[in-house]
């Protein structure tokens, strides 16, 4: 029995998932409170995206539970989970390429709002530095701006928790820095603020961005803690570098 008193955020409890006999996740547990940026890292194939897919309802777990606030969402469909307050982005950008930037954001807002849509859209465009691109088709945007737009559209649904799957993938250093500033600003925003679970292979970005970090390797939790604690954890260093006599960035 799960103690659901005073839950605020998403809680993953002993989640396991396998594919054709291969164990992708094994009894993984973590809690992402609202207002916290939580990193999820690990070598390739460690189960990070699988965990996001389970949380968002794209995949059912073999065992374990997922709770959002005081609601067990384990068996719910992905669209129902989205309506309850979990939004996500994907490794591969999924925008409506022929629609304008403004129309893409509007699609997110209209999923949960029936009034004040224009004002909400304008606010999100301003927050993400997209106002000058408002009339541009999404498919014509520079790649870094597309990444920013995808997050803005997701936030348009007013999520309690935002799952970001490699938001900095394909970005150059300056684009990554701009994205980091935007995400940090969202966390403290009184209107759009929410909890976030972020996957990224850019360890420097994750270490700077996140309040707490959870580390997977071969589907199992090997460490969790502050960026400094994780950076110096012997199991994490070995998982990434194969030995313990060097340091992570």
Image (cartoon, rainbow, N blue to C red):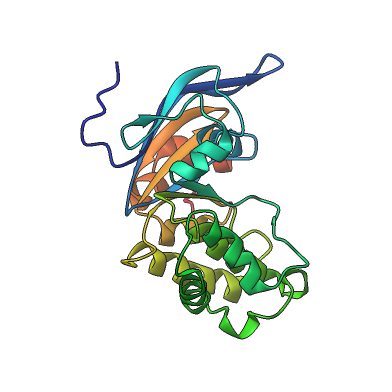
Total number of numbered discs in the rendering: 0
Furthest residue in direction left, as rendered: 5
Q: Left or right of 19: which side holds 231?
A: left
Q: Quadrant of residue 219?
A: top right
Between residues 221 and 5, which one lies in front from this camera angle? 5
Q: Nearer the viewer, residue 150 or 50?
A: 150
Q: Residue at x 71, y 52 (%)?
A: 92
The percent coordinates of residue 31 (x first, y second) are 35, 37
Q: Residue at x 63, y 50 (%)?
A: 90
Q: Position of residue 233 (x, y in %)?
A: 39, 41
Q: What x and y, as percent, mark residue 78?
A: 57, 36
Of 61 and 209, which appears nearest the observer?
61
Which residue lies at the image location 46% right of the left edge and 70% below the top edge? 120
Q: Is residue 62 above or below residue 228?
A: above
Furthest residue to the front?
Answer: 115
Instruction: Tell me the quadrant of the picture where the N terminus can be found.
Output: top left
**Relative to residue 68, is residue 182 depicted above or below?**
below
Vertical comparison of 146 with 216: above or below: below
- Apparent side of residue 134 relative to residue 40 in the rendered image (left or right): right
Q: Quadrant of residue 217?
A: top right
Visible residue check, residue 143: yes
Q: Is residue 245 visible?
A: no
Residue 155 percent coordinates (x, y): 49, 60
Asked which quadrant contains residue 101, the reply is bottom right
């Amino acid at each position: 029995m799960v103690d659901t008193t005073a839950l605020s955020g998403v809680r993953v409890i002993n989640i396991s998932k396998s594919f054709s006999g291969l164990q992708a996740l094994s009894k993984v547990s973590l809690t992402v409170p609202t207002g916290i940026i939580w990193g999820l890292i690990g070598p390739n194939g460690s189960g990070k995206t699988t965990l996001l897919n389970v949380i968002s309802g794209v995949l059912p777990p073999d065992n374990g539970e997922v709770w959002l606030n005081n609601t067990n969402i384990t068996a719910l469909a992905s669209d129902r989970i989205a309506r309850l307050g979990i939004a996500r982005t994907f490794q591969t950008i999924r925008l409506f390429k022929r629609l304008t930037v403004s129309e893409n954001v509007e699609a997110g807002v209209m999923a949960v709002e029936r009034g004040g849509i224009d004002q909400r859209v304008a606010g999100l465009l301003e927050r993400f530095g997209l106002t000058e691109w408002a009339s541009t088709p999404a498919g014509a945007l520079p790649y870094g701006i597309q990444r920013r737009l995808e997050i803005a559209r997701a936030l348009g649904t007013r999520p309690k928790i935002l799952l970001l799957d490699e938001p900095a993938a394909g970005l150059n250093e300056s684009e990554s820095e701009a994205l980091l500033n935007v995400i940090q600003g969202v966390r403290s925003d009184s209107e759009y603020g929410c909890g976030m679970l972020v996957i990224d292979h850019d360890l420097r970005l994750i270490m700077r961005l996140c309040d707490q970090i959870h580390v997977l390797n071969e589907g199992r939790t090997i460490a969790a803690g502050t960026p400094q604690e994780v950076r110096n954890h012997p199991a994490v260093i070995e998982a990434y570098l194969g030995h313990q006599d060097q340091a992570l960035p």
